[in-house]
Image (tube, helix red, strand yellow):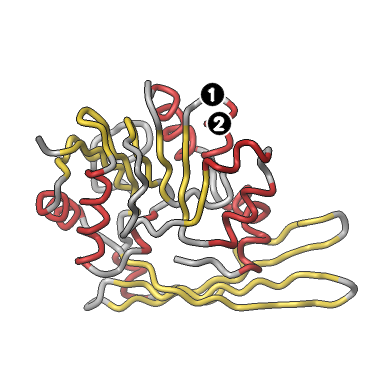
Amino acid sequence: MEYPEFIARFYDTIYQQVRNDTDIDFFLSKACQSKGKVLEIGVGTGRLFLEALKKGVDIYGIDISPSMIRVLHGKMESQARHRVWVEDAVTMNLGMKFELILAPFRMLSHVNEVEDQLKFFNGVAEHLQPEGQFIFDLYVPDLSLLLEGMEEYKDFEGEYDQGKRVKRYISSHSDLIRQTTHVTMTLCWEEDGKELSDCWEFDMRYFFRFEIEHLIARSSLELVTMYGDYQGNTLSKDARDFVVVCTKKT
């Protein structure tokens, strides 16, 4: 999914507050344990990638959104920029194989069609070393939220520059047949003495446990385990995340 310029611009400011580091700590520990090349799919502005690079991980990253890659390049030394580039994960052909491939922050939710989901899984398998692992996460659907939707509310307000503030408003409603949630995200910010705003609408695909298992079974991947959180606990009725570990089928 391509992010608009105005979303990429304020992405780090907003997500430093609205997203905790529990998922990053998990994925970062996995990256640091890898003895070979690591690929992050959906690298974004580098929330995970830059920390892994600092720790000496041989990591590469792709993202379909040029605006996000531009922001990330702006935070990197020029000699390291070859490690990240614009690429569609569904059709990727990178010419490298990896010991570990990560797709954090619910990247698969942006792949709506079953055919593309299978292409993605098969492409991941093609890029894995024989003993490599693929780890991704998805959110556990909240059934009441799917049924009732979410009225617009302000989930963030803060400074993006000295004396300048940005606010984010978000709402959603779901299509139970298509298994998608339509999200509307509005940003309002102060600039040059003016109040500016822009709106972004997009769909996110939600998944259930056995659907994930069946998709993996149909692909060239093999399910190793599925956790219910980033501490490695088993799935339970209170789980809010699917954390999925796969290997390549032999």
Q: Answer above or below: position of 189 versus 211.
A: below
Label 2 sits on residue: 53
Find numbered disc 2 in the image and state the secondary structure of the residue it sits on: helix
Tell me which corner region of the image, top left, top right, bottom left or bottom right, holds residue 98: top left
Label 1 sits on residue: 56
- Of the residues shown, which amino acid type is indicated by label 2? Leu
The residue shown at (39%, 59%) is: 88
- Of the residues shown, which amino acid type is indicated by label 1? Gly
Q: Answer above or below: position of 247 versus 238.
A: above
Find numbered disc 1 in the image and state the secondary structure of the residue it sits on: loop
Tell me which corner region of the image, top left, top right, bottom left or bottom right, holds residue 206: bottom left
Q: Quadrant of the N terminus?
A: bottom left
The spot of residue 136 in percent (x, y) is: 33, 45
Residue count near mark 2 (Cα–Cα under 10 Å), binned few <14, some 14–19, many ≥20:
some
Q: Quadrant of the C terminus?
A: top left
Q: Answer above or below: position of 129 versus 11.
A: above
Taking depth in this image into account, of 97 and 205 the one nearest to the observer is: 97
The spot of residue 6 in percent (x, y) is: 66, 68
The residue shown at (29%, 33%) is: 233
